[in-house]
Image (spheres, rainbow, N blue to C red):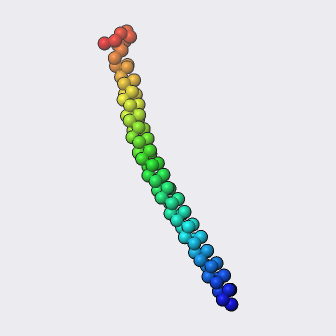
Amino acid sequence: MILLALIFAFTLACIAGTQFFYLMFLEKVNRQCKQRIAELERQNTAILRELRKTQALLERQSESQERWPEWLGDDDTVR
């Protein structure tokens, strides 16, 4: 009976140890995921900033192209 109790206690200790190390593993993975998310958010911010710069540049270029008819006269000479 004592041997059965020892085996049962040892089994429960092994299960608890396994769950403890699995919990530590999950916490590590969670930390890595949070770091990756923060990194992706920083990259997203940089890409969004670059996109806005590019859009502003394209708008200025399109405004410049719309002015070409104003610069040219009827006889195609530059004013």
Instruction: Name which quarter of the figure residue 76 lies in.
Output: top left
Instruction: Name which quarter of the figure residue 57 lies in.
Output: top left
Asked whether, in this view, residue 66 is left or right of residue 32, the answer is left
Q: Residue at x 48, y 52 (%)?
A: 36
Between residue 78 and residue 38, name the one nearer to us.
38
Quadrant holding the N terminus: bottom right
Across and down, in percent, residue 20 comes to: 55, 70
Q: Residue at x 47, y 56 (%)?
A: 34
Is residue 4 in view from this perspective? yes
Between residue 40 and residue 50, name the one nearer to us.
40
Is residue 59 in view from this perspective? no
Instruction: Name which quarter of the figure residue 68 lies in.
Output: top left
Q: Please tell me whether residue 2 is drawn above or below residue 35 in the rendered image.
A: below
Across and down, in percent, residue 67 comes to: 36, 22
Q: Residue furthest front?
A: 3
Q: Residue at x 46, y 48 (%)?
A: 40
Asked whether, in this view, residue 1 is left or right of residue 39, the answer is right
